[in-house]
Amino acid sequence: QVQLVESGGGLVQSGGSLRLSCAASGSIFVINTMGWYRQAPGNQRELVATIISGGTANYADFVKGRFTISRDYAMNTVYLQMDSLKPEDTAVYHCYADVQSSRYTSGRNYWGQGTQVTVSS
């Protein structure tokens, strides 16, 4: 089994910054893609950013230029630096990881339980 634990959420004023972290632990042979989704009340879960094992990052249009995703491969951790936050960024942010538990198994997606980000106007 693999566990993902997020941290770093909180309350911030519009224009402020937060940095989210997500550490993976457990039965890990290799982590392929890691990323972040978010879900606001009454909305569908939406992709925020992903980063593959080679380091290439992809972002949703609504966060380009404001958010930066990065990874610490040695620590199996993914980060999301969020700058210029807006009230519409308010949501629960979930990290995920595509993890192979051995060289003989295919990747499987694991999810963290989420961290609340609230941006006040």
Image (tube, grey):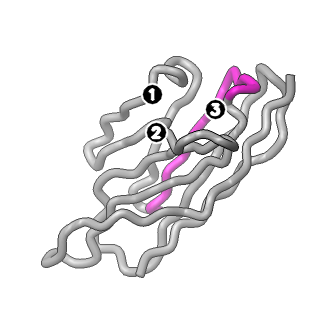
Tell me the number on the disc at residue 60.
1
Numbered disc 1: secondary structure? loop
Q: Amino acid at mark 3?
A: Met
Looking at the image, tell me whether mark 1 or mark 3 is earlier in sequence order: 1
Q: Residue at x 32, y 40 (%)?
A: 55
Mark 1 Cα-neighbour bin, 10 Å: few <14, some 14–19, many ≥20: few
Q: Residue at x 63, y 57 (%)?
A: 114
Q: Are marks 2 and 3 in contact (CB under 8 Å)?
A: no
Q: Which residues are magenta?
A: 75-88
Q: Which residue is mark 2?
A: 47
Q: Does the magenta run of residues contain 76? A: yes
Is 85 on the left or on the right of 60, as rendered?
A: right
Numbered disc 3: secondary structure? strand
Q: Residue at x 44, y 47 (%)?
A: 35
Q: Quadrant of the C terminus?
A: top right
| Residue 80 lies in quadrant | top right
Between the C-alphas of marks 1 and 2, the distance is 7 Å
